[in-house]
Amino acid sequence: MCGSISRRVWNRRVAATVAAVAISTAVAATGAADQSPGGPASPVVVSPPVTPYVVDVDLRDLPPPVEWQPGMPIKEIPRREFHPPALVPPEPGPHGDPLVDLQRSVGESWADGFATPSRNFTSIGYQSLNPADPVGDVGPNHYIHSANGSGSSVIKVYDKAEPLPSLLASTTMSAIAGGTGACASGQGDPVVIHDQFADRWLLAEFASSGNSLCVYVSQSADPVAGGWFVYQFSFPSFPDYHKWGVWRDAFAMAANESSPSAYAFDRAAMLAGAPATFQRFTAPDLTGFGFQTLTPADTDGPELPPVGSPIPFIRHIDNESHSGFAGPGDYLQLWFLDVDWVTPANSTFTAAPAIQVAEFDSTLCGLTSFYCMGKPGVAQGSNSSLDPLREPVMFRLVYRKFSDHETLAGNLVTDVDGANLGGIRWFELRGSGTSWSVFQEGTYSLDNVNRWMASLAMDGAGNIAMGYSVSNSTSVYPGLRYAGRLAGDPVGTMPQGEASIFEASVNNGSNRWGDYSSLNVDPLDDCTFWFAGKFGGPTSGQWSTRIATFKFDECGTPDFYLGASPAEQTICAGQQADYTVSVGQISGFANSVSLGASGQPASATAVFAPNPVTPPGSSTLTVSNTGAAGAGTYTIQVTGSAIGSSGHSVGVDLVVFTSGPPIPSLVSPADGSINQPLQPIFGWTGGNAESYTIEVATDAGFTNVVFSANVSGTSASPATALASNTLYFWRVIAFNPCAASSPSEIFSFYTEALPGDCGFGSGPSVRFFDNLESGAPGWALGSGGSGNTWALSTARSYSGATSYHAVDPSTTSDQRLDAPSVVLPTGANPLTLQFWNWQLME
């Protein structure tokens, strides 16, 4: 291509000189150098390992959250990320919900006790932030509640006293990080998850900068004084509206990115505080939504999913709103992430055939508006009406395993009358693996009140409860209610309710609402529901969060449940492995539980100490006498039996190695390669290894190691860029419990040259040079008229006797000097423009 060089003088009282202009490029010494909703997922992306900060701190010693005071500014949490839809179909015509009449016909047949919350109190109140994003979860001894706060998410830790829990600690997530990196301050969107199978806590929020999340994993069951592991994970794009769930071999997460993303995080590593990776996939966009997200499954109850179960993710598809998905009715679409931590290339993310459900309507005041749900004095759909959040299946998608079936249950908001009245479509799916179908579905709407922003859960008896927001434009201020169904109620109905948590008497001050709530089941009795939501008040323009608990009297059969950790142990034949088996208590169950094991190597012994166990309690499972065991993975099934229970089981894996690993073979970057990216993906081959350590150094003796990582797979990439235009050396060592291999051979490579660098094996090729000593042919005065004073001169010369000089103007001027046209080479990297100049500034 052709180009020109200009020099402008814009300011008064400036004298300037230009001489010796050159354009060059580095050249080698030898010469110049449509997808539909059911379409395929992206290839897997594997993150570099992230090492956590280990924080040993008592939350009671940390600074409390900053309480808003009158006069302080009001902050809005960033709106959900919107991306232009690929194709916006025409708005469908209004239609009613076919399931509403069934719900309204059954009336309310109250379950005893369900109508009165056993706990019901206000927790967090702010006027400085919108929205609240209230969330929480419950463990054996604590309830942790969180909402958006100034600078970071507020967290409050309560005991579980009735009727009013005591506040044990109040601080922010970023205070736990203690000034560490981007987690020194947060941007909100909190998530709280209790992993009942490990009795541990996970907290997460946006980091203060970059495409990062701060993830906090408790070191023990005690979230107050037990300490935390702090992970800062970085993502390919901003992980908006991240939602989490507990699965057997992973923490699952989904986010609204440029396409809906699905993640699996290494749960075992994070619970151990070890370097952890994630695996990421994306699904094709829906054509009608600009906000694209999936919702991951989160496991409730005492049973983990069966071994080998892929992680379910879900979204809903309003057929009329998303063109390109033909067929009658509307749909739920499940995606399944089958993660392989040893060989990530074997991980898959696949969509099952879409599940047809009754018609629903996603066009609540359109497909993108943040305004819809009216409140007193504010008409439905007008400015300041409340955000409907039509796009996601709401947090949480609940998974539960019963003795005779597995279930997934969730909800979404829908327009029930074609006139933007919000109602709650809820559903229960049954199946296993990647095969699921609708067991029941219903739409909860009783009258002219909007019901939305719901969270749903199922107790151990199969009863369902749902907490949600309510409002309308005449008399119902933004408040909170709940309803439910017993397992034996007519399918598709929620006749147990409607009960009130808080009937507000004032409006909040923003249209931002939610953006979610949470309903969770207490693991101690597997019956008590804990709900956290947002209401308007207590004073006009303000919002507050409310926590309430309730249960069905029909739930509560005493029982026990089992948990085991770690989920996997690796040994060399002849070594022993120890597992901790937890025996949990439901509704005061106190009968002795006898433990047994099966599936261990034929020659091995499995001994529990103590055995039996009176719940709540624990036992150590020791697998020994493994010298004759063959190499492979053994799934050991731990069973528990007791009088008064049908029995339970939990599986753990024992991986046996019988010899050390071979020396890895390096693949890429190839030895001696040049122009490698600054964050190269290192790859190698190997086998019979539990892990690999990669080292990258600036010297062949590896005395200056600039990047190292311990990974389970055969690839790695540095989280930060290497230096450009630099020679590096790398090697890999394989490990398993039997031995470590010798280091691999050493490969070297050069990183790419950036603009201004001349890469290794290349030199400058000058394409244009003029020192102005030959009369400067081809140079010309540009715009500026008669006031252009550029001229050849001997003033301020550089390497010769001549330069171009412009005099000090007395008025503002635009004086340009244009170089001759220069043909720039294609494909050359880098191109460098160099010139000498001098200015005298006033």
Image (spheres, rainbow, N blue to C red):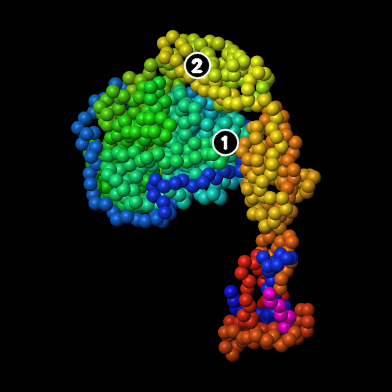
Look at the image and say whether residue 161 sits in the magenta stretch: no
Closer to the camera in the image, 759 or 315: 759
> Residue 150: in sight, yes or no?
no
Residue 151: image tag: none
Residue 341: image tag: 1
Sequence-wise first label, 2 or 1? 1
Answer left or right for 467 relative to 17.
left
Q: Give the range drawn in magenta.
A: 767-772
Local SS, label 1: loop
Instruction: Look at the numbered discs 2 and 1 and tell me whether their residues touch, using CB distance below 8 Å.
Output: no
- Can you say which quadrant of the picture contains the N terminus? bottom right
Q: Which amino acid does label 1 sit on?
A: Trp
Q: Name the residue under label 2.
A: 639
- The x and y percentages for residue 163 are 40, 24
Q: Which residue is drawn at 69% across and 56% down?
A: 674
- The x and y percentages for residue 86 are 39, 55
